[in-house]
Amino acid sequence: MKSKAIFAGLMAAITVGGSLLIPVGASAQRSLAEQSHRRQQKKNEWRNLAIGGGALTALGLLKHDSTLTAIGAVGGLYSLDRYEKDRKSQSRIDHARAAAYSRSSYTRNGHRYERRIVTRHGKRYYQYVRR
């Protein structure tokens, strides 16, 4: 009986410990291109929610329902605010990405890296190579 309890406790500890480590690995910093893509997705979601809030406001006005109108207006305005914040954030990310790749070389930890153009599947990319 005691060994079953120890085994169950050990399995629970492994499960909980493993689930706690997953967010640590998932929170690793994404590349600037991935951040920009994710920001574009979120921006599109907020735009669609703002459109929905506007439609709800219009429906509330047509039905003479002040509650529906207020909820639609508040939701639409909040979504527009978040859309604008995401738009500015994406612009900052895109500028940072452009600044990072505009340099022909950089030095990190005493090693010099030079920018090279690489062609993969018919597309051209930049890659920094250690010299």
Image (spheres, rainbow, N blue to C red):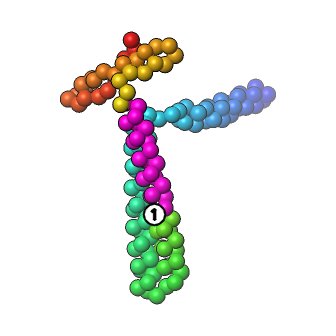
Q: Is residue 74 visible?
A: yes
Point 45% across, 63% down: residue: 80
Q: How many marks?
A: 1
Q: Is residue 4 visible?
A: no
The vertical placement of 3 against 130, above or below, is below
Q: Is residue 99 magenta-colored?
A: yes
Residue labelled with disc 1: 80
Point 49% across, 61% down: residue: 81
Q: Residue 59 location, x and y as percent?
A: 41, 80
User: Which quarter of the rendered picture does the N terminus lie within?
Assistant: top right
Q: Quadrant of residue 92?
A: top left
Q: Residue 93 location, x and y as percent?
A: 43, 42
Q: Residue 13 location, x and y as percent?
A: 69, 31
Q: Is residue 110 magenta-colored?
A: no
Q: Residue 12 location, x and y as percent?
A: 68, 34
Q: Residue furthest right?
A: 2
Q: Quadrant of residue 44?
A: bottom left
The vertical placement of 104 against 8, above or below, is above
Q: Residue furthest bottom?
A: 64
Q: Is residue 122 left or right of residue 20?
A: left
Q: Residue furthest left?
A: 122
Predominant SS of the magenta segment? helix
User: Which quarter of the rendered picture does the C terminus lie within?
Assistant: top left
Point 59% across, 33% down: residue: 24
Task: State the residue in front, 59 or 40.
Answer: 40
- Residue range of the region highlighted in magenta in the rendering: 79-101
**Residue type at numbered disc 1:** Leu
Task: State the residue in front, 27 or 77.
Answer: 77
Point 37% across, 27% down: residue: 103
Tag 1 secondary structure: helix
The vertical placement of 86 against 31, above or below, is below
